[in-house]
Amino acid sequence: MTHDPRSVTRRVAAPVSVSRPVSSPIHTSVVYRSTDADELDSQYEGRAKGYTYSREGHPNATIVAEKIDWLEGVKPEWGGGVVVASGMAAVSTMLLALMRAGDHVVAGNQLYGRSLRLMTQDMPRMGFGVTLADPTDASAIRAAIRPETRLILVETVSNPTLRVADMAGIAAAAKEAGVLLAVDNTFTTPRGWKPFENGADIVIHSLTKLLAGHSDAMLGYVAGRTPEMNKAFYDAAVTWGFAPSPFDCWLTERGLSTFTLRYDRAEATAAALADRLAGLKGVKRVLYPGRSDHPDHNRAGDLLKGRFGNMVSFVLDGGRDTVNRFLRAAEHIPFAPTLGDVGTTLSHPASSSHRGLTAEARAAIGIEEGFIRTSVGVEEPEQLIGEIERAVAASRG
Ligand SMILES: *Cc1c(COP(=O)(O)O)cnc(C)c1O
């Protein structure tokens, strides 16, 4: 069979092997062949399982979806979440699946930058009403709900000020009003907090960040707590064309196998870094939900139960020159506008994620020029903390 010249252009079957691979193969095939029309019928009618066209699903996407379902506690009877090409594709899938003409959304006022832009520019352009409200104040969210509100979208811990949302209050308000509660759990991860166990109807992830964890794969995920919602998410993703790449799914599967180890290590280092930074000359303020000087420390304790995460923000005492000296001195730590890499990264919101705001608008949410956000990775803790300490000292000129 393998020597049949007709199979040179298309292999008809995988090479025979009674042993099976230990790591998942990457399935790059866009189309899947069936034996005959009856077999295809049974597949479309749900009597047999199988793939047809990779925009509609492929094995590498299924593997990742099942793993995130498990991490987030998605029940089999809910039907399972959908993996899409990016975190923003997950937010879009959710909105495109659920919103009807005239519907309104209540969104957190400190969402991820692009989500915020989607809410303030694209949604209104398409005729949807949007009200932004402060998620640390459940009464503000409650007051923003209207009769035509379809859903609330919030993040549990905000970027980059690490404010903690009043999730219990928001879940109660959503339930009372009969609106759906969607939580973008990218920052907190299911290791930190499980939205479905705490009243959320929908969970969204940018898998690009901590879950894939190596800054080499871009992927998103969305799941709901009913089979109807998950069917709607699947259809929206297939129709609007948000299919994930098999290679990115494969890399994400690989990254996921070390997620809990990476997260626990990074979190422990983050707590130690926050405490060390707080005692340094040249540091005006440290923001870490695990510290008693954090504005939401009590709520963080109740909600996150000690899982305060890998993100630490702090404010250098000085302006742009101080920031530049700090970044140049921390030469082994990439200055890069993302988070959740296996190694530590630094970002400067005033020149990246929040550059679109005026200095006054930034100041109103506590982001001054000296504000630095650290996404802590898995380095040797003392080496990392030592390097940051030396860079803070160098920042003072
Ligand atoms: C990065 C991020 C997104 C967007 O994810 P992409 O994979 O970059 O599209 C959405 N929400 C949060 C909280 C993020 O950090």
Image (spheres, rainbow, N blue to C red):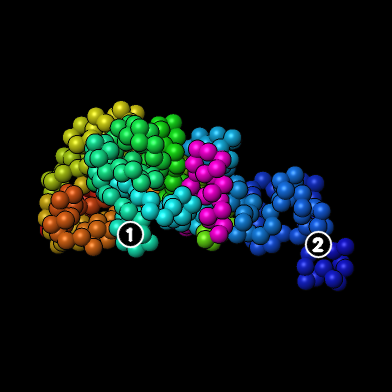
x, y percent for residue 182: 40, 43
Left or right of 103 on screen, residue 387? left
Which quarter of the figure has residue 187?
A: top left
What is the number of the mark on residue 124?
1
Question: Considering the image in quadrants, where does the C terminus appear?
Answer: bottom left
Q: Residue at x 60, y 48 (%)?
A: 62
The percent position of residue 249, horizontal first and vertical second, equals: 55, 53
Q: Position of residue 192 (x, y in %)?
A: 39, 36
Q: Quadrant of the N terminus?
A: bottom right
Label 1 SS: helix
Location of residue 12 (image quadrant):
bottom right
Is residue 60 visible in the rendered image? The answer is yes
Crowdedness near tag 2: few (<14), some (14–19) or many (≥20) residues, C-alpha within 10 Å: few
Residue 179: assigned label: none
In the picture of the structure, the residue carrying the numbered disc 2 is: 12
Estimate the x, y position of residue 81 in percent, counting from the top left: 53, 44
Query: Where is residue 79, by image quadrant?
Result: top right
Q: Residue at x 52, y 44 (%)?
A: 229
Depicted 328 relative to depicted 286: above or below: below
CA gap, disc 2 to disc 1?
A: 51 Å
The kind of residue tagged 1 is Pro
Q: Which residues are magenta?
A: 212-239
